[in-house]
């Protein structure tokens, strides 16, 4: 269990697509999350302990931010933060031809 203080919701939010079911949140807090070489501020939703075995799941609110870079090689996934260095720049993709 992670020992964070959180704010209780007056009206819980229902998260759908959590596994094969849905779950009601009991609170939330904002935190600076750091995973591998990437960090960002995200809103953490708190659910009852009996819904999952792990303390925290990092998802799209973290990974889909513009400065977060995900790199996968085989079964390994690493997260980096775009610091503006040329080493992490990706070349622009050519425009795709679309027949209308």
Image (tube, rainbow, N blue to C red):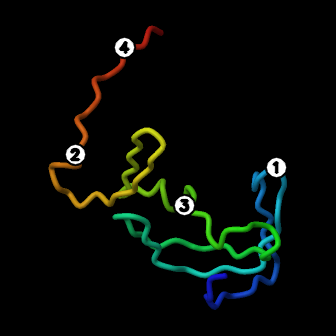
Percent of width and height locating residue 78: 40, 53
* Foreground disc of the pair 1, 4: 1
Q: Specify the quadrant that holds the N terminus.
A: bottom right
Q: Earlier in the sequence, mark 1 or mark 4?
A: 1
Q: Which residue is drawn at 39% across and 69% down?
A: 39
Q: Is residue 6 left or right of residue 39?
A: right
Q: Is residue 86 above or below residue 34?
A: above
The mark total stands at 4
Q: Is mark 4 on a helix, strand or loop?
A: loop
The residue beneath circle 2 is 89
- For mark 2, does the 10 Å Cα neighbourhood hold few (<14), some (14 to 19), or many (20 or more) residues? few
Q: Is residue 9 above or below residue 94?
A: below
Q: What element carries label 1?
A: loop
Q: Distance between the residues labelled 1 and 3?
A: 20 Å
- For mark 4, does the 10 Å Cα neighbourhood hold few (<14), some (14 to 19), or many (20 or more) residues? few
**Splitting the image into 4 quarters, where does residue 34 fall?**
bottom left
Q: How far apart are marks 1 and 2 (CA)?
A: 37 Å
Label number found at residue 3 = none
The residue beneath circle 1 is 20
Q: Which of marks 2 and 3 is nearer the N terminus?
A: 3
The residue beneath circle 4 is 97
The residue beneath circle 3 is 61
Percent of width and height locating residue 98: 42, 13
Q: Which of marks 4 and 2 is nearer the N terminus?
A: 2
Q: Which of marks 3 and 4 is nearer the N terminus?
A: 3
* Foreground disc of the pair 4, 2: 2
Q: Which residue is drawn at 48% across and 56% down?
A: 63
Q: Earlier in the sequence, mark 1 or mark 3?
A: 1
Q: How far apart are marks 3 and 4 (CA)?
A: 32 Å
């Amino acid at each position: 269990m992670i020992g964070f203080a959180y704010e209780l919701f007056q009206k819980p939010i229902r998260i759908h697509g959590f596994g094969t079911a849905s779950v009601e949140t009991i609170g939330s807090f904002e935190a600076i999350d750091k995973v591998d070489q990437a960090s960002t501020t995200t809103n953490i939703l708190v659910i009852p302990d009996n819904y999952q075995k792990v303390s925290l799941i990092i998802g799209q609110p973290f990974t889909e931010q513009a400065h977060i870079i995900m790199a996968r090689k085989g079964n390994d996934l690493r997260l980096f933060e775009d610091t503006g260095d040329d080493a992490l720049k990706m070349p622009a993709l050519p425009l795709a031809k679309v027949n209308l």
